[in-house]
Image (spheres, helix red, strand yellow):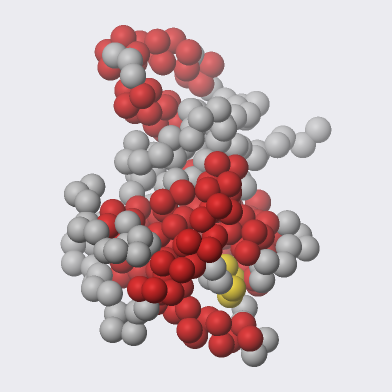
Amino acid sequence: MAQDNRWYGRSHRPTYGVGGLIGAFLEPVPPNAGAGSRAHPAARRQAQGSMGSGPAAERQIDDEMTEIHKAENHWPYLYRERDRRESILNNTPARILVDNNQDPFTPEPWYASHSMGVDAVAEHEEMIVQEAERTGVDPDLIKAIVYVENSHGGNYGALTEAAGAADSYLPMNVQKSRWQTLAGKSADLTDARANIRAGATLLKRIVDRSPEYSIDKIATLYNNLSADAVNSYGARVSDVYYGKEWYATRQPPMIP
């Protein structure tokens, strides 16, 4: 029997925020897992003794156990876009690194339409919450991306879709030729539910492969899977996420 190298995040509870969206350590453990993997329960008990209890401590322990599991089973670091995309589509183990960018360009572009972003999030909010719960992705991350995609490129995207010339479809600007199967082999990405499902699944698989969870890095990879450093898109999504700009009245940015 061929070894099943797929892995899945536990769905017993989503872990939103800076602590990471990854569940506990991932299952199933490959057949060639080392003794250290089998000792995880003892390691968890030891960590609990030193870190205490509570949701924050549990998230930190979950993240550390996940990284132990990845290191023991030699999950490869992927640098080529093609390899990263194949790992995400096939859901195979991998790590994807993105460096910080000390000076990303983040101002809202002059052509942005705040109202289009607000309307898109409001129209699809119920679906966003449902797909966030299904995948374990922070719903505010999905809302931030929907806001940016529609407020920054909604007019252009709507025109190309109407003309039948689009390969990417709103509300999450998912590219059919690359990511359609994330919502199902015959998924219609012009359908909002399928579109958000594909986008949320893509975000989940990016998060699972990111050693360090941060909004700007996850969004950068959502925008450009070949990126090796935070780009302006990732920085802009981070600003929108912490400022919750999808509300009709703008709010001052929150401090991460």
Using the rendered image of the protein, determine whether residue 239 is visible from the camera's viewpoint: no
Identify the residue at horizontal 27%, vertical 63% (top origin).
Answer: 250
Q: Quick one: quadrant of the N terminus? A: top right
Identify the residue at horizontal 55%, vertical 41% (top origin).
Answer: 133
In front: 154, or 29? 154
On the picture, is 137 further left or further right than 169?
A: left
Using the rendered image of the protein, determine whether residue 171 is visible from the camera's viewpoint: yes
Q: Position of residue 60 (x, y in %)?
A: 34, 28
On the picture, is 209 further left or further right than 105?
A: right
Q: Would you identify the image quadrant in which residue 179 lies?
A: bottom right
Q: Position of residue 161 (x, y in %)?
A: 62, 82
Identify the residue at horizontal 46%, vertical 55% (top origin).
Answer: 142
On the picture, is 88 further left or further right than 50?
A: right
Q: Is residue 128 above or below residue 109?
A: above
Q: Is residue 148 above or below residue 27?
A: below
Q: Position of residue 104 (x, y in %)?
A: 23, 68
In front: 2, or 177? 177
Count of number-bearing discs: 0
In front: 221, or 149? 149
- Residue at the outermost bottom position: 163
Identify the residue at horizontal 51%, vertical 56% (top origin).
Answer: 125
In front: 197, or 89? 197
Q: Would you identify the image quadrant in which residue 230 lies?
A: bottom left
Q: Is residue 234 above or below residue 13?
A: below
Q: Is residue 154 above or below residue 218?
A: below
On the picture, is 224 further left or further right than 196?
A: left
Q: Position of residue 146 (x, y in %)?
A: 46, 64
